[in-house]
Amino acid sequence: MINTRGTVRISVVQLDEYGPWTVEPSPRRETDLQALQARLYADFADFVGRSDGYAFFNRFDNMLGIANGIDVAEYERFQERVRNQYPITVSVGVGEGETPVRAVEVASQQLQDAGSAQDPDRREVLNAGDTSDSSGYVTVGHFDIVDVTESFTDTEHAATAGVAIQQSMLALKQRLLAEYDSVAQFVGGDNMIAVCPQLSEDVFGDVVDHVYDQTGIEFQVGIGSGPTAHGAGNRAKEALEHCRETGTRVHEATPIQQQVTDD
Ligand SMILES: Nc1nc2c(ncn2[C@@H]2O[C@H](COP(=O)(O)OP(=O)(O)OP(=O)(O)O)[C@@H](O)[C@H]2O)c(=O)[nH]1
């Protein structure tokens, strides 16, 4: 069943009492922490990916799952895997909302209501706000810097290029969050993926223009929609290819027809 209201389901996975653990009994070797975080992110990406979700690493000590196809109970298996394979455990909050920001708020609230991230008594919580039976509907904008290879990668040293690109990513992310209730994540190279409410091509055009005005960096964006993050994101990637081929800065894939259901 596809939900007409376009609700999106998002999970927040948070490492339990991780801050204290990183320094007990003494500060742990940094590269060991980085490897742990990277492995956990990879496992989480595989977990949500199996159900056509997307994983955002956010801050690594908490990660977001764009998780329309994932029942709340399925996270118990993920928590078990983490418990069995890592020296830490994770708590999970799940939220649904008409916008991604609302869904993240609800999911975060589930964790915050259960206790602090550094509370030794809060361990392996799995809480969800109100969830519907319908699969929801997601819009994904896949943003990419126009010709980053020539502008930065092949012409600037890696540190300068990194700063410029991260500044443009921050401007993009802030604009999407503050004005359009969208949640975005840098996913590598020159790519940013945004999970959005249904927004027009014109809005995406305004976002790209705004970031260009602020940073001088030009993005192109492919837009796709569908019942899952993967479905929407794949369509967004195809739309981005259209941008590359035609020089268009914004292109939306033809939306999958939303089925009308009565609650
Ligand atoms: N995560 C992710 N990274 C990608 C994807 N496509 C490209 N990248 C990354 O982006 C970098 C730059 O590739 P491109 O975006 O194709 O390079 P470009 O010079 O900007 O070329 P145009 O996008 O055609 O303007 C690559 O080295 C990858 O790190 C993608 O779909 N997902």
Image (cartoon, grey):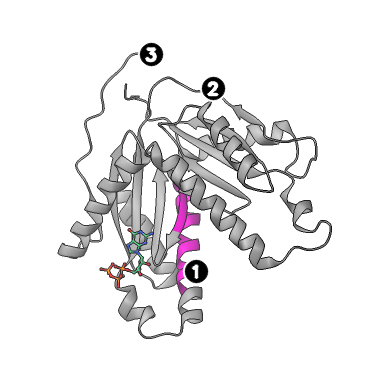
Q: Which residue is mark 2?
A: 130
Q: Nearer the viewer, residue 198 or 240?
A: 240
Give how far across and how far down residue 104 sits, in percent. 54, 39
Q: Secondary structure at mark 1?
A: helix
Residue depth check, mark 2 versus mark 1: number of the one nearer the observer: 2
Q: Which residue is mark 1?
A: 167
Question: Amino acid type of disc 1?
Answer: Gln
Q: Is residue 245 left or right of residue 37?
A: left
- Please identify the quarter of the rendering in which residue 243 is found: bottom left
Residue, far right:
25
Q: Quadrant of the C terminus?
A: top left
Q: Nearer the viewer, residue 227 or 126?
A: 126
> Which of disc 1 and disc 3 is earlier in sequence?
1
Q: Identify the magenta region.
A: 164-186
Res. 182 visible in picture: no
Q: Which residue is mark 3?
A: 263
Q: Is residue 209 left or right of residue 74?
A: left
Tally of numbered discs: 3
Q: Is residue 203 magenta?
A: no
Q: Secondary structure at mark 3?
A: loop
Give the residue drawn at x 72%, y 31%. Answer: 114
Which quadrant of the frame does ligand 1 lie within?
bottom left
Residue, far left:
246
Are dots 2 and 3 in contact, CB under 8 Å?
no
> Which of disc 1 and disc 2 is earlier in sequence?
2
Disc 3 packing (10 Å; few <14; some 14–19; many ≥20): few
How far separated are the C-alphas under marks 2 and 1?
36 Å
Question: Amino acid type of disc 3?
Answer: Asp
Judge whether 125 appears above or below 225 on screen: above
Give how far across and how far down residue 45 sits, in percent. 46, 47
Disc 2 packing (10 Å; few <14; some 14–19; many ≥20): few
Q: Quadrant of the N terminus?
A: top left
